[in-house]
Image: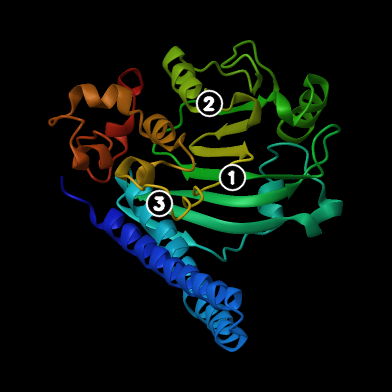
Amino acid sequence: MTISEPLHRVRRAKRMLLLAWLVTIALCGASLFYLGLADYRMGGFLAVMTVILGTATVLPARAAYRAQWKRQSLLAGYGKYAEQTELDENPHMAPEQVELLCLFPFDMNAVSDFDVSREVRLVCRERGLRITELSIPARIRGLEAVVDGCLIQMTMPRAPVSRMMLTGEAFGSYDILTAWYRKNLRLLPAMYSVQAHMLAFGDGSEPSPRTLDQLDRITARRSRDIVLCLSGRELSIFIRNAKVLRRPPHALARITQQRLERLGIPEVPAILDFAFDTEALRAGADAPYDETEERKQAGLRMTDEQSDDPFRRPEEAP
């Protein structure tokens, strides 16, 4: 079985960490052995060497393993769906950028609690998708003062509805959210629904059944903890208690290709499917959708690089 380059790099970093641990443990065992024989000079010398070697080898090897896991899991996981992947450990985002989205009540009086930890940037068929891990000061009774999660933003090649919000029950009661969206976005409670634990708000436009079905796939995993905002072509999603990257397995755990490819945000494939409306477009694709390149190209068959017509649904075509 062929081992991919990302998996090979992670396993090599893990082996170096295990080797450093084994040498350190062996020295520690030797030190205890000599101390048991009352040879305090040799035992003390080996104890000092254990501390020095552990500091000089184990800690750097551990840092190298974690760094490789971040880079390679990003490449192996998100790289399946994007032509370019980038991880920024020191991103900048002003709190006003999140406040203006009006996803849920934002407490500007506690703006010092606003924090951005990392960001993953993907390029999918020349469209950028950003996943930002951040902490947002909330102003909802019953919700934590600071809400941690991931903000996903993308400009889609199509506009399925003019404006709508789907908000999980964890972000507030019906009355609070109704007042918030009416005041800030002029949205009212909608008659349609997507998930049992979500509230829908809109501007009166009615999404198609296929749109609702695609939104159902995005929100199915964590309906209570998701806020989804559609404003024309702008798609913004906040997922509470989500991490953009999974934590690296401990040194003794077996690392497989499937484990390396597991996404921190498993909703990404459904988001891209919705953004490009691939469900309709795959039916007319020239090549099997299971091919890697066709998956990255979202099953699209371009006829005019300057036109957005190939992205439209059949009923929306002129």
- Is residue 318 something one can see in this rendering? no
Q: CA distance from mark 1 to mark 2?
A: 15 Å
Amino acid at the residue labelled 3: Leu
Q: How many marks?
A: 3
Measured Cα–Cα span from mark 2 to mark 3: 22 Å
Question: Does 161 sit above or below residue 113?
Answer: above
User: How packed is label 2: few (under 14 Cα within 10 Å), some, or many (20 or more)?
Assistant: few
**Of the numbered discs in the image, which one, if any, rests on residue 150?**
1
Mark 2: which secondary structure? loop
Is label 1 or label 2 in front?
2
Find numbered disc 1 in the image and state the secondary structure of the residue it sits on.
strand
> What distance separates the C-alpha of mark 1 from that of mark 3?
15 Å
Between 51 and 180, which is closer to the camera in this rendering?
51
Q: Which labelled disc corresponds to residue 122?
A: 3
Disc 2 and disc 3 in contact, CB within 8 angstroms = no
Q: Residue at x 78, y 38 (%)?
A: 105
